[in-house]
Every structure is written in C-alpha cells, then in structure tokens.
Image: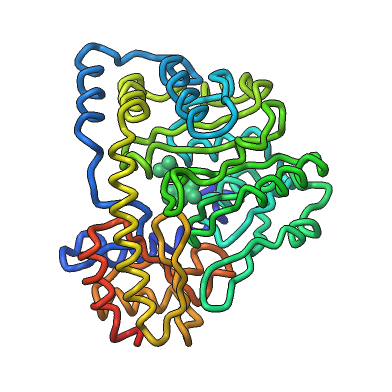
Amino acid sequence: MSVRRAIHDLETSRIADIVALGFGDPDVIALWYGEGDVPTPGFIGEVAAAAMRAGETFYTYKAGLPELRHALADYLSGLYTRPVAMERIVVTSAGIGALMLMAQALIDPGDNLVIVAPIWPNIAAVVSIMGGEPRLVSLDPVPGGGWRLDIDKLIPACDGRTKGIFVNSPANPTGWTASADEIAALTDFARRRGVWIVADEVYHRIVYGDRVAPSFLAPGEPEDRLIVVNSFSKSWAMTGWRLGWMVIPPDLLPTIEKLIEFNTSGSPTFLQRAGIAAIREGEPFVQSFVARCRDAREAAIGALQSCRRVEVAKPDGAFYAFLRVDGVSDSLAFAKELLAKTKVGLAPGSAFGPMGEGYLRLCFAREPAAIAAAVERLRPMLA
Ligand SMILES: Cc1ncc(COP(=O)(O)O)c(C=O)c1O
C-alpha cells in the first residue's frame, strides 16, 4: 500500500505491545496506561446527558464554546499569578488533539522540535507525522532515583531548523516537575533564540507539594511564542471524553481555527457543557483524586524501594513510578516476562526514548491497596 513514508515509518507504541499481550485478561493488574480507575464524577456526566437531550447536537464554534473558554480563562487566572485572556484559549480534542494542532501549525518537513525526555512517545510521533525531527534531550538521572534538568544541554541541541523546545511538566513518565526558576530560565532561553516553547501541562494538578505545578503561563507574555497544552483527561478523570484545551498567542488563533476546521470542526457541544461543569464545580473531585494518588504514591514507592534491584524516587508530580531495575537491558522483554509470570502489566521504559531503557513505568492512580498488592506480585522478580 502506498502511504506517506513518515506514516509508514511510525513505530507502534511499545506500551501497546504489552497491552496486546494482556488486555482483557481478568487476572491482570493493568498499570500500563496513564489513567486512574475512577470513572468521571457523575455530576459531569449528567450535564453532558442533559445537553444532549436538550438538542445541543449541532456544529459549533471552531475554537470552543465562549462559555467554556471563559470558564477556562477564569480557572487559569485564579490558579496562576497573571490573568489569561479568553482570546488565548482554544478548546481541543483532548491533549493529543492540541499536540497534533501544534505540530500542524509549527512543523515544516525538516524542522526539529527539541524535546526534554524521557517523554510520552506520542509527542515525538506528532512531529514525525509532519515530516519533522523529534530531537530528544535527556534529563540527567540522579543517583538513587529522580531526574534533573541541565538547561546547558539544550543549547547544543538547537540549530537553525529548531522550531521550539518541548517541555512536559509534571512529566510522564518520570514525574520530574520543573521549578519556577527553571521555567523562567527556559522562557528566557527560548526568547533569546527566537524559538517556541511548547509546554505540556496535562498533569498540572497532579502534584504533591502544592495545589498546582509551576506553569509556563506565569512568566509568559501573551505575545511570547508559547503554546500550553492541557486536558480534562487526568485531573477530572475524563480520559475517554477527548476534551482539552491549549493556550496560544492571540496571533495564532486564526491559524489554529483554520486547522480545527479540517481536523474536527470543533469539539462536541454537549461535551463542552460538561467541561464547564468540571471546571466550575470539579475542585473537590480534583483534590480528593490527588489525595488518593498521594496515598498510592506512598504505597508504591515504599514497597518498590524495599525491592533490592529497584532504584526509584518519589515523583513530585504525575502518577507514575519510573523505576530502574538493576540488570535489565531490554525493558520490553522484561515487561513481557513480568506480565507472563506475575500478571502485572507495566510499560517498558524504552517506550519513552532510549534514555528510558532499563526502566519500567507503573501507573499508581489506583486504590493504594491495589498498588500494594501489585508490588507484592512483582516482588519475587525485583528482589
Ligand atoms: C504528557 C502527556 N501529554 C498529553 C497526554 C494526552 O492526554 P489526552 O489526549 O487524554 O488529553 C498524555 C496522556 O497520557 C500525556 O501523558
């Protein structure tokens, strides 16, 4: 079949390789995907159902319902120190939809995006789809576990074809969370180089030391070349809804609206109504979900650290333990072996770039007892 080379060459996700082996097996504890086990809060679903029954089923605004954009502007302006205008906000088909729009808007064939890694593989994929080069620059592993950013490593990674720098904080899979100082330094660096910052902040609320993670929206001026991607998926337990948003410079709005026309022609109205409810009334849910993740993090990291071959640190954000296992040089093969022998499904570290080899990712957004049970099953293979 004759398809574009860039699409033909896309690798299928190594996470999917593991899922394919265990999906649907009732005995498997599946910790391979980045989502929790709690369904969307009922009050959010009720709003969507009511809007649908009320006939909100027509074509709509490309950039999103003004009411939802207003709600998001209020929400972000309340979270951070500086206001975010509604004109900068575009509703998207979840985080991945926003990332694809970003790549379509910015990446010409031959351009590159410098990506702080290890990183969720779909980010490299959207760049590759456009014929660009995802250029992964590794965080530095800290002895004993954890990761640190060395901004100086980004300088030699950028060249004349660099369109921007991609930073996911809090990060999937490492949990690394950029400090306000690091964000200010990255913003400064991007301004001096005249490149974009693309900030993926889908885990902005899944943090354990504060109410929200430091954001690129804080130092960012509206006219900066800054795109901040966010989503309802993680903080409001809405992974299946495919609803998200991006914050962009006002000048980019016509371009993004043009692209939305040809991608989705806008997000479904009844889902957006539910998004307004999530944003305006979802705070207690977000806080209880994060509290549960915090307990599960304690259970996961405590149990994993007691396994002799494991090196892992408590992540500051997101809901993953990214563990290095001594003696593992093929994490995909090891994840397959773990699934076969223990019936626990983990994501292989190599899915997140070559610097992830030797690691495994465990999603702990579960009942803490379920996480403890999973680690007990894994223990004989990790001890
Ligand atoms: C870093 C990161 N960005 C974006 C997404 C996209 O999430 P969604 O498309 O469900 O909003 C994910 C999902 O796992 C993620 O981990």
Where's residue 339, x and y in %? 29, 74
- Which of these two is toward me, 371 or 246? 371
Where's residue 382, x and y in %? 36, 84
The correct choice, above or below, for 123 with respect to 90 in the image is below
- Which of these two is toward me, 69 or 9? 69
Q: How is the image coloured?
A: rainbow
Q: Image quadrant of residue 29?
A: bottom left
Quadrant of the snapshot with the C terminus: bottom left
- Which of these two is toward me, 198 or 215? 215
The correct choice, above or below, for 50 with respect to 237 in the image is above
Seen at 54% across and 34% down, the residue is 80
The correct choice, above or below, for 102 with respect to 85 in the image is below
Seen at 20% across and 65% down, the residue is 369
Seen at 44% across and 38% down, the residue is 231
Where's residue 155, x and y in %? 79, 56
Where's residue 188, x and y in %? 76, 43
Q: Image quadrant of residue 278?
A: top left
- Which of these two is toward me, 357 or 16? 357
Seen at 19% across and 64% down, the residue is 25
- What number of labels is visible? 0
